[in-house]
């Protein structure tokens, strides 16, 4: 039987420490290498590359091997999120085993490679050309000339001074430059397409920005049988199940035409019970909503919110509902939703908005 190690037998922490001055030197070196790229990039090539993407009549495929492949996949994803629905990553190995069938003569293929001599990409070129695709190379060969560039219709050279890797081998600087180049071109395409904030949000419906620009109150409100509804003449004690079971923390008090009279919250119930004791059994919801206590204690100042609750229209933006809940003089946890005829059609709660990701 084995036994647990005692604390004294636990492995000791590494004695090797990161040298802060060395870390600073590496960051400074990386910045210098990036400056080298920025000052030597041929903007005419960058412009031609961006124009080719913008004018592509078909799909735009990005491909690469290793770290360049990871960058290619990321840039394809970025463009898709900016409204290029046919932007995709094409794995060069899978392409040679059938995926090349997705490529048509109207498509464009961008091939990322630091050396411009990746065997997988060189094997892909004749197959892609046979499909009639337009080929663009993005390379960083030291000479500025390489096999891949010579084989493509358009060549872009990304100047790389050296990798900050001590052996000048690990593609850490070159991959960063590829990413900076691709993402910067993507933003240039945003400007050229005049992509609006709402269009951008439409492509990110699951993100907080997208939700705040897309979701309306009617998309997140409770409605119909979910509503905690009661009438003015109902006894408070008869409505406890309605108050507690709908998960809204309140009752919406309506008249016979479904117009909002006021609200009654679980907090109001506690205050009424404290003030009235057994008398609460005889109080109607309307008597509580219409009470006009002049004691002016902090709790009783809230009576104005009971009689004149904040409300919102179903077509308002959901983020506006959240702002309205948080507005002075004090925050609230819900908003009744009224249509243009002042009819109660829903309720939106702070919990519901948070659950929706807003």
Image: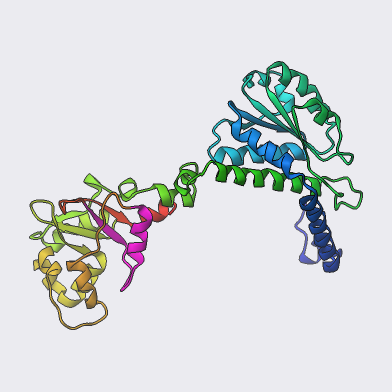
Residue 57 is left or right of residue 90, and the answer is: left
The image shows a total of numbered marks equal to 0
- Magenta segment range? 317-338
Q: Position of residue 283 (x, y in %)?
A: 10, 67
Q: Is residue 157 above or below residue 213?
A: above
Taking the magenta stretch, the answer to whether it contains residue 344 is no
Q: Is residue 10 left or right of residue 228?
A: right
Q: Is residue 11 visible?
A: no
| Image quarter of the C terminus | bottom left
* Residue located at (75% from left, 47% from top): 177
Q: Nearer the viewer, residue 162 or 189?
A: 189
> Is 15 rendered above or below residue 165?
below
User: Is 123 displayed left or right of 264 in the figure?
Assistant: right
Tell me, yes or no, if residue 254 can be seen here: yes
Q: Residue furthest front?
A: 44
* Residue nearer the viewer, 310 or 264: 310
Instruction: Check residue 324 for magenta coloring.
Output: yes
The single residue placed furthest to the right in the displayed view is: 167
Q: Image quadrant of residue 323?
A: bottom left
Residue 219: % across, % down: 33, 46
Q: In this rendered view, identify the residue nearer to me: 261 or 196.
A: 196
Q: Quadrant of residue 31?
A: bottom right
Residue 74 at x, y = what percent?
Answer: 66, 41
Toward the viewer: 192 or 59?
192
Query: Which residue lies at the image location 83% right of the left edge and 33% below the top edge?
Result: 116
- Residue name at image x 71 percent, y 45 percent: 181
Residue reaching furthest to the top = 130
Point out residue 251 in the picture as x, y percentages from the top left corner.
21, 59
The relative height of residue 97 versus residue 279 in the rendered view (above or below) is: above
Please say which color scheme the image uses. Answer: rainbow
Residue positioned 42% across, 50% down in the render: 213
């Amino acid at each position: 039987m084995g036994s647990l190690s005692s604390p004294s037998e636990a492995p000791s922490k590494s004695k090797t420490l990161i040298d802060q001055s060395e870390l600073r030197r590496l960051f400074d070196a990386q910045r210098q290498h990036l400056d080298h790229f920025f000052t030597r990039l041929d903007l005419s090539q960058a412009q031609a590359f961006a124009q080719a993407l913008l004018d592509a009549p078909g799909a735009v495929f990005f491909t690469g091997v290793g770290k360049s492949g990871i960058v290619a996949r990321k840039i394809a994803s970025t463009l898709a999120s900016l409204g290029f629905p046919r932007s995709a990553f094409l794995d060069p190995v899978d392409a040679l085993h059938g995926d090349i069938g997705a490529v048509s003569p109207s498509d464009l293929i961008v091939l990322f490679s630091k050396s411009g001599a990746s065997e997988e990409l060189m094997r892909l070129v004749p197959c892609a050309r046979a499909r009639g695709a337009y080929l663009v190379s993005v390379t960083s060969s030291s000479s500025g000339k390489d096999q891949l560039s010579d084989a493509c219709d358009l060549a872009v050279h990304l100047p790389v001074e050296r990798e900050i890797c001590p052996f000048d081998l690990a593609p850490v600087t070159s991959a960063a430059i590829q990413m900076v180049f691709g993402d910067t071109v993507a933003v240039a395409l945003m400007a050229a397409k005049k992509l609006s904030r709402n269009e951008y949000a439409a492509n990110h419906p699951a993100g907080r920005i997208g939700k705040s620009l897309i979701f309306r109150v009617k998309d997140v409100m409770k409605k119909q049988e979910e509503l905690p509804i009661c009438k003015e003449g109902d006894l408070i004690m008869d409505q406890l199940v309605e108050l507690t079971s709908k998960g809204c923390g309140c009752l919406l008090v309506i008249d016979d035409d479904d117009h909002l009279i006021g609200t009654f919250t679980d907090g109001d119930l506690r205050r009424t019970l404290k003030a009235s004791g057994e008398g609460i059994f005889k109080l109607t919801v309307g008597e509580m909503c219409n009470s006009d206590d002049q004691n002016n204690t902090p709790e009783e100042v809230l009576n104005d919110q009971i009689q004149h609750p904040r409300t919102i229209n179903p077509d308002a933006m959901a983020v506006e509902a959240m702002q309205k809940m948080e507005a002075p003089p004090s925050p609230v946890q819900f908003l009744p939703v009224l249509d243009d005829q002042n009819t109660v059609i829903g309720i939106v709660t702070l919990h519901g908005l948070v659950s929706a990701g807003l």
